Amino acid sequence: MFYLLFLNSHLEGPADEIVKKLPGGKVKKKDKQEVLIERSVRNKKKCITTVKGLETFSIKLADASKIFGKKFACGSSVVKGPSEKDQIDIQGDFQDELADLILEKYKEVTSKHIYFVEKEKKVPM
């Protein structure tokens, strides 16, 4: 009985120590918790603001897209990105206002997690 209790207590541990191992002994890396905000231009005058990385904070992208669309009175949708991860596209140039709204609505996201993508470089907020 004592041996069984010792064995069970030895197997249990903090959840942080559990690492997902892939076949061949490789260790899967966790995604970095960062939010990337990027502005792209289409048709010379029209802008699209793209938000990537909100799902790493356990934020539902559909709900966030709905909030952004209502706040900025524009079209907002969840689309598949080129890297097979979902991202939010917002019609219009809302980089600065979007960063403030994310900080206000989602307390788990801090200003050190938000980056702007300008000319293929990540710039901290």
Image (cartoon, grey):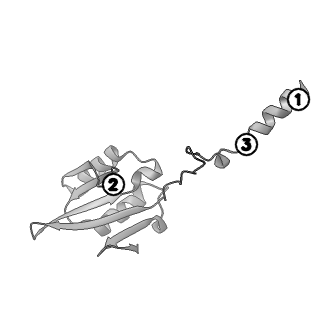
Q: Are marks 3 and 1 in contact (CB under 8 Å)?
A: no
| Closest to the observer, 43 or 92 | 43
Occupied quadrant, residue 10:
top right
Q: Residue at x 90, y 28 (%)?
A: 2
Q: State left or right for residue 33 relative to residue 63.
A: right
Vertically, is 39 above or below 59? below
Amino acid, disc 3: Gly
**Could you tell whether 71 is left or right of 10 in the image?**
left
Tell me, for residue 13, which label it has, or none.
3
> Which is nearer the N-term, disc 2 or disc 1?
1
Tell me the SS state at disc 1. helix
Q: Quadrant of the C terminus?
A: bottom left
Q: Is residue 39 above or below residue 74?
A: below
Callout in the foreground (2, 3):
2
Instruction: Measuring from the top left, give residue 75's x and y in whole percent.
Output: 18, 52
Label located before the other in sequence (3 or 1): 1
Element marked by disc 2? loop
Front label number (3 vs 1) = 1
For disc 2, the marked residue is: 83
Mark 1 lies on residue: 3
Instruction: Count neighbours of disc 2 (C-alpha within 10 A) and say few if under 14, some if 14 to 19, many if 20 or more.
Output: few
Label 3 crowding class (10 Å Cα cut-off): few <14, some 14-19, many 20+?
few
Q: Quadrant of the N terminus?
A: top right
